[in-house]
Amino acid sequence: MPAPVVVAVAPGSAAARAGVAVGDEVVSINGIVPRDVIQYQLLVDDADPVLDLIRGGLTQDLEVPKPAGEPLGIEVDSALFDQVRTCDNHCEFCFIHQLPPGMRKSLYLRDDDYRLSFLYGNFTTLTRFTEADLERVITENLSPLYVSIHATDPDVRSDLLGNRRGATSLRWMRALLDHGVEVHGQVVVCPGLNDGDVLDDTLAGVFDQYPELASLAVVPLGISDHSNGARMRAHTVEEAATVVGVVHRWQERFLSVTGRRLVFAADEYYLQANLPFPRPETYEGFPMHEDGIGMARTFELEFTGELTEPSGPRAGFFAWVDGAPATGYRTPPTPGSTPVRVGGRRDAPIGILTGSLGAQILGPLVGNLSRDDVRVIEVTNRFFGGNVGVTGLLVGEDLARVLTAQPDGHRYLLPDVCLSSGRFLDGTSPDDLPRPVEVVATDGIALRQILVPATTDQMVAS
């Protein structure tokens, strides 16, 4: 098992004081070889941990004096030190199967590892979950977890996953709930396969068998031009409206019986069906914000000043762990690591770069400012194609195409959700774009601070 490598040491931290250096390999902690960053954190949380390090090919023991609970102060190069548990399902709708060729190798990794579910919010189908995994989740309180349900009918679920174990693996979700583990579920709706009556049956199954779920996200199938799924297609407008109707009916049933709505439809359904977004309070705290549930409403509240703090997803485990960076397709933007290029005068006209779905949300909000010098620039995603319209999947190739046709000297705002470690998914960076861009946080508060001067806010408040 490869040892984790130190990639950063916080200045002034316990590790820095003890002499831990970038490049050190952490072989063991207190004589125990950690399997992953979860076990690692539990070990380094103790007082005065002893690190067995390899530095320059030589082994040395290094005691790190510190009280229990004080952060060690290092970052390692991966979250899992043993082998990642890869996915053995064959889902036609899996987006990783739909990636264009020639991208970074790590982007094509399909995991089905409950540890990555806990660490990053990845969804697991539980088809590779075991009794030993259940024991560890319970013993170490690895909560919350995120489970791909898709259907509660065993035959339908097995067909959707392309795996016969899909018919029985939800028994593990029942066991997790029985032991008090917080579980969030997801249903990816594939038209003609698990929508309509099947979706209705799935929500009935959740109502009967898994009412303790923390939340259930109903999301549309994302399909790129590189999909080989013969049965996969995008929703029609009518189908999107039907999904919203089914979700709303079940929300009322859950609310009347359990006191909460539990199930929510993705923002994309409301956009596609030309339906208004639900009231903010109906999202019940936005538990599935990261899954595209309520993003539009929270952005609106942030942009209009009704929320004064960004309302993004809960930080979870990495709010306190000495972290390891996420890798692969789901890698989030890293605060402070995004390069910023400033183009144009501060009073120059502003163009806001966004995907096709983001343009539908931003357009009305920006229009309400009555500013002729601010425009929303919709960037069609030709790199992935299909119905891919989320801003987070924009790549440099498409941005460059659009920016080439834009005037020089303007200010171009780019949401940081497009970038991971300063790069787009196609491997390019903002430095490769034909116009300078300003990378800004992907929330309504950051955009408002740029577009609405403080004096204007004060005038409105008075």
Image (tube, rainbow, N blue to C red):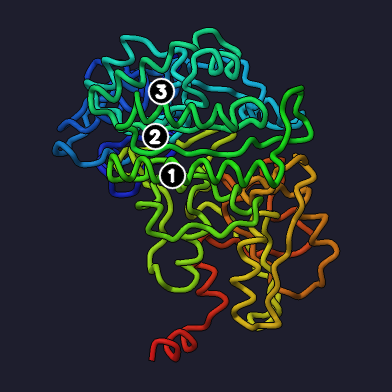
Give the amino acid type for the residue marked by disc 1 in the picture: Met
Q: Going from the N terminus, do you reach mark 3 or mark 2 first? A: 3
Residue drawn at the location 68% of the way across and 80% of the way down: 345
SS of the residue at dot 3? helix
SS of the residue at dot 1? loop
3 vs 1, front mark: 1
Q: Going from the N terminus, do you reach mark 3 or mark 1 first? A: 3
Residue drawn at the location 76% of the way across and 56% of the way down: 433
Quarter of image, res 2: top left
Give the amino acid type for the residue marked by disc 3 in the picture: Tyr
Q: Going from the N terminus, do you reach mark 2 or mark 1 first? A: 2
Number of other residues with Cα within 10 Å of mark 3, as a class: few under 14, some 14 to 19, many 20 or more: many
Give the amino acid type for the residue marked by disc 2 in the picture: His
Q: Disc 2 marks which residue?
A: 184
Asked whether the beta carbons under mark 2 and mark 1 sit within 8 Å of each other, the answer is yes
The alpha-carbon separation of the residues under discs 2 and 1 comes to 8 Å
3 vs 2, front mark: 2
Q: Residue 52: x percent and y percent? A: 30, 20
Quarter of image, res 227: top right
The alpha-carbon separation of the residues under discs 3 and 2 comes to 13 Å
Q: In this view, does 252 lie above or below 183?
A: below
The answer to whether 25 appears left or right of 19 in the picture is: right
SS of the residue at dot 2? strand
Q: In this view, does 42 lie above or below 315?
A: above
Q: Residue 372: x percent and y percent? A: 70, 83
The answer to whether 84 appears left or right of 403 in the picture is: left
Q: Disc 3 marks which residue?
A: 114
Q: Residue 386: x percent and y percent? A: 76, 40
Residue drawn at the location 48% of the way across and 27% of the way down: 202
Q: In this view, does 137 lie above or below 304?
A: above
Q: Disc 1 marks which residue?
A: 288
Q: Residue 118: x percent and y percent? A: 38, 31
